[in-house]
Image (cartoon, helix red, strand yellow):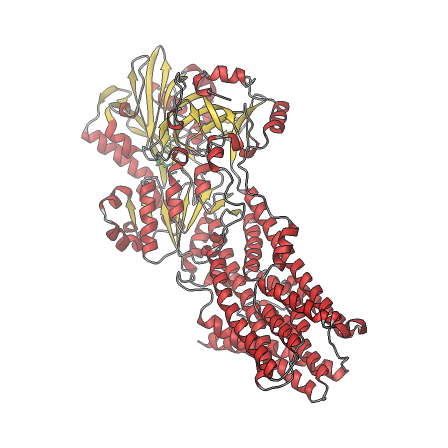
Amino acid sequence: MKDVFRKTSSEVLKTLDVTEAGLNTDDVHKRREQHGYNELEESKRKSSLQVFVEQLKDFLVIILIVAALISAFLGEIENTIVIMIVVILNAILGTVQHVKAEQSLNSLKALSSPTAKVLRNGIKEEVPSREIVVGDILYLDTGDLVSADGRLHENNSLQINESSLTGESLNASKDLEPIDEDDVSIGDKKNMVFSGSFVTYGRGVVVVTNTGMKTEIGKIANLLESAKEKKTPLQASLDTFGKYLAVIIIAIAVLIFAIDLIRGNDVVDSFMFAVALAVAAIPEALSSIVTIVLAFGTQKMAKENAIVRKLHAVESLGGISVICSDKTGTLTQNKMSVQQVYVDNKIVEHDQLDLETDIQNRILLMSLLCNDSETVDNKEIGDPTEIALVNFGDDYDYDEKIIRDKYTRVEELPFDSERKLMSTVNKYDDKYYMVTKGALDVLIDRLANIETSEGVSPFTESTKQEIEKVNKEFSMNGLRVLGFAYKEIAEGENIDFKDENDLTFIGLISMMDPPRTESADAVAACIAAGIKPVMITGDHKITASAIAKKIGILKHESEAVEGFEIEKWSDDELKEKVANISVYARVSPEHKIRIVRAWQEKGNVVAMTGDGVNDGPALKQADIGVAMGITGTEVAKEASAIVLTDDNFSTIVKAISNGRSIYANIQNSIKFLLAGNTGGVLAVLYASILALPVPFAAVHLLFINLLTDSLPAIAVGLEPHDKDIMKEKPRGINTPLLNKSFALRVLSEGLIIAIATLIAFHIGLSTGDHMVASTMAFSTLCLARLFHGFNARSNQSLFKIGLFTNKYLWFAVILGVVLLHIVLLLPALQGIFKIAPLNAAQFGTIYAMSLMPLVVIQLYKVLVGKVNLVK
Ligand code: ATP
């Protein structure tokens, strides 16, 4: 639609064939068919076939295939077929892994996709933003993302941040007037809103004029970079590590090839063996195993109310050492109820209000008028602080809708957590009154008079002290306090923030928001896990401290500070003090960023919760930004790595526990892979250096790779989470996954596997039949690597974690054992897999040897566990 900005919004509605009741369901379907979904096109996903072909494109795999083909030309056709089959099976397995991981990531993405509020069939409803169509009537509130382009139809002080389109970081104020000019830039189209921006203040209603790729952002965005998640830091470092490892392994393979040649072995055979060794020993699946384990982990977390929006968050979660949490709704229930009212110089209990007394009646009326919340069919809609007031009115049979109809609102200045005030102008007996409510410490400096039943008198220092005393008393009981004031204004006068002055004080209303029942336990769990919980709130310091004390965050009052105090400190001073502060009250979003930075500079990994429109930068600055799913704005969700669907602090603690376990599982899975590969390489090196016959055929190595590199490694990564993981301290920020002790373990476990394999090999060699020896070495290595999965599950012994607690591993191991035996026992396969038939004693040797690493390593774990216990 062209030149929408020139038209009035009613003309736009008409042109788009939309009524004031919005579109009906039929219209929506038709328009969607015509314009498609409201989404920016992403570059096409790879098909499974493409993924499969990519698996085969690996440089070493290509060389292997070429070598196998050459060998076929030279007559070894059987060998070639088997190698090709194993290579293809491996590629299929890789493809399944890749597709599975991608599917779980996509379902995760769907969970956290943004929503929008639209009017359809006359009813306001919330729909996924991608379902918006041209002509939809879209509601915008502070903190909402604008998800389509539209013409403004109603405006309540709407201000929008359009920096993603215009580069301008200042908010753009919107108005309804048509613009009679040509060539108007986006920034100057004041009667329009654009997809990709967000509402920083006020409210509005717009008619959608363009969606998807036709929006302004769609025109500049072209294709989204890629649908694929970027690699996480862990995956990136594993990739680098994998490359170094590949170089070492290829060097070993070249060395072995050279030795074989010098010994006069067949060139093609030797070459194929060397390449197979490289293919089998290079853990190319590292990164994709990490994705799978992360993706499975995030599914578990989603079930436990934490939706991971950015995969890398899972890695950092385990390292978190500080959680900066909002109070209201996160640590508390966000279910407020009015407790006491201070009016006419006295405190009145919530059920003792005397409505016959004019001033007591009026504070109740004002609390319903300067209020945007309501109950519809017993459903509470809006801000809990205001709902408490609506319920309070209900207790006295005051219906907020009837009251609001009677004293119509003509203007408003919405609440924002920086100003901490809200004002409305209501018509009252042909007069206009501005009613202001908000935090007392802000309101108190704007008061000129006080009203009691005696009449209106000037606001003196002594009245101020008296009111502050009452405020303190309320706050010390953990109550939230709202001050109420008003003034008369002239008809038609437009108000702005400057008018929130010269007010007449009428009273205070205090309300209770009890801590969540889980909060105290979750805080205790944090402390036991070496994580510092910190409360950051917009509420009053005394209220915040009282709640913090109740749930164990604060021990002494001196640990609480207010935002204005931080402002006086330099960044260095804040850094020095930050460890001793547990409660920050009356803070603004800028303070939050400084607090996060101060902790980070002290070497901490920080999680920060947020819900407001201005919390975005702090959520991004934190190592893990955590947004509230229920009360959070779309902007906060967009900026965060994790969204809590229940807004609950204890969910963060659960997520950290999951993060730690997932990290440990990934570490174990990698250890499993590397130790097994090391075992194989050491065995080959040993035989080669001692001029023994080659212990394995090329196809043996590939077969072992097939059986052990995917399924058991993933199964180790899916180990049930360790209940004791939160008894440990957080992982240090600089502790790499692949550290010295990790390398030592891999090498020693690999060595034990190699020794077991070589003992079986030597026993086989003593029969004088090389084929028997190599069959025994192959079987032992294969089984030992499978059984080693049980070692890799945990640092603790199987006696402690239970032998049968990881059913995935049992499945993977049993499948591996069965497949191996099919190859060992089926005469038809024996030939092509270069297998000699074995007798019972030889089978016994294989089993004894392949179980040996399991027994030795478990014994070690039991003994070390004992030593630790003695310590
Ligand atoms: P947090 O969620 O960070 O713990 P909060 O939700 O308690 O903080 P805000 O919502 O920013 O913080 O509220 C700050 C102060 O503003 C409150 O202490 C209260 O005095 C006042 N306030 C809160 N809600 C309203 C409202 N709807 N209208 C007027 N004033 C309000």
Q: Position of residue 576 (x, y in %)?
A: 26, 55
Residue 654 in the figure: left or right of residue 453: right
Q: Quadrant of residue 709?
A: bottom right
Q: Nearer the viewer, residue 44 or 651?
A: 44
Q: How many marks?
A: 0
Q: Is residue 342 left or right of residue 286?
A: left
Q: Is residue 251 above or below residue 545?
A: below
Relative to 329, is 61 on the left or the right? right
Q: Nearer the viewer, residue 147 or 382?
A: 147
Figure quadrant of residue 37:
top right
Q: Picture coordinates of residue 112 (x, y %)? A: 53, 42
Indicate the quadrant of ligand 1 in the picture: top left
Whether residue 383 is visible: yes
* Nearer the observer, 271 or 787: 271
Q: Is residue 289 above or below residue 324?
A: below
Residue 752 visible here: no
Left or right of 569, for residue 201 = right
